[in-house]
Image (cartoon, helix red, strand yellow):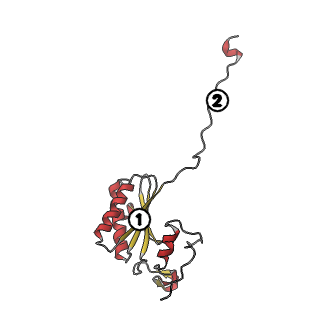
């Protein structure tokens, strides 16, 4: 049995190496990913997303903003397979609450499981307050799948400002003149 040829790096669409997973993990998982031309193509180069199966390994990217939560299910290269927000699952009011994010992540995990995905990694980012609810939904979804889905780990991306924003200018003092002092 010959060893499969694994590429040196996992290019994204623009050719930059991916930073979603560590390089060694990405290289190991890359051989299980279908090639882009093998995915469910229909006539004239369009992709049929309703009948195509997802790759075995995926990344669940959760962006928690102040007023909404966005979830994208991608492959290990970063190509988006499906995406949703709290409003797209029918919640119109109170979109910023953690309960709405919980139901959103649960629905995306169910979609991934139905399409044949076997392993998921979770990436949390953004300044919102739905991080703990998304992590709880991720763990509950994996437990509910009864072993069909397994976790590749969870990672929280904290955006650290490098020297921050520009500071406001210092307030200028009012100069005292001779007319003000009475001399």
Point out the tag, 1 or 2, that comes first from the N-terminus.
Answer: 1
Q: Quadrant of residue 123?
A: bottom left
Q: Which mark is residue 172?
A: 2
Q: Looking at the picture, how far across and down is residue 121, in whole percent?
A: 42, 67
- Number of marks drawn: 2
x and y percentages locating residue 44 in the rendered image = 52, 84
Task: Provide the residue designation for mark 1.
Answer: 153
147 on left or right of 42: left
Q: Is residue 92 visible?
A: no
SS of the residue at dot 1? strand
Q: Determine whether the residue tagged by mark 2 lies in a helix, strand or loop.
A: loop
Task: Please tell me whether mark 1 or mark 2 is closer to you in this view.
Answer: 1
Which residue is pictured at 35% across the width and 72% down the height? 149
User: Real-space Cα distance between discs 1 and 2?
Assistant: 53 Å
Q: What residue is shown at x 59% (from left), y 46% (from top)?
A: 163
**Spot occupied by residue 150 in the image (x, y as percentages of width and height):** 36, 71
Report the front residue among 166 and 117: 117
């Amino acid at each position: 049995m010959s060893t499969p040829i694994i590429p040196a790096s996992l290019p994204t669409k623009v050719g930059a190496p991916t930073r979603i997973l560590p390089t060694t993990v990405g290289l190991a998982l890359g051989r299980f990913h279908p090639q882009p031309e093998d995915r469910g193509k229909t006539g004239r180069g369009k992709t049929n997303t309703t009948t195509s199966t997802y790759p075995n390994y995926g990344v669940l990217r959760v962006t928690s903003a102040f007023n909404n939560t966005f979830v994208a299910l991608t492959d290990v290269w970063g190509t988006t397979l499906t995406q949703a927000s709290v409003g797209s699952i029918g919640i119109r009011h109170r979109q910023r609450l953690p309960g709405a994010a919980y139901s959103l992540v649960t629905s995306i995990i169910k979609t991934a499981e139905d399409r044949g995905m076997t392993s998921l990694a979770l990436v949390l980012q953004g300044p919102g307050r739905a991080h703990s609810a998304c992590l709880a939904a991720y763990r509950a979804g994996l437990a509910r799948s009864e072993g069909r889905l397994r976790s590749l780990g969870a990672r929280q991306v904290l955006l650290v400002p490098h020297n921050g924003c520009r500071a406001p200018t210092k307030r200028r003092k009012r100069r005292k003149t001779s007319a003000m002092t009475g001399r």
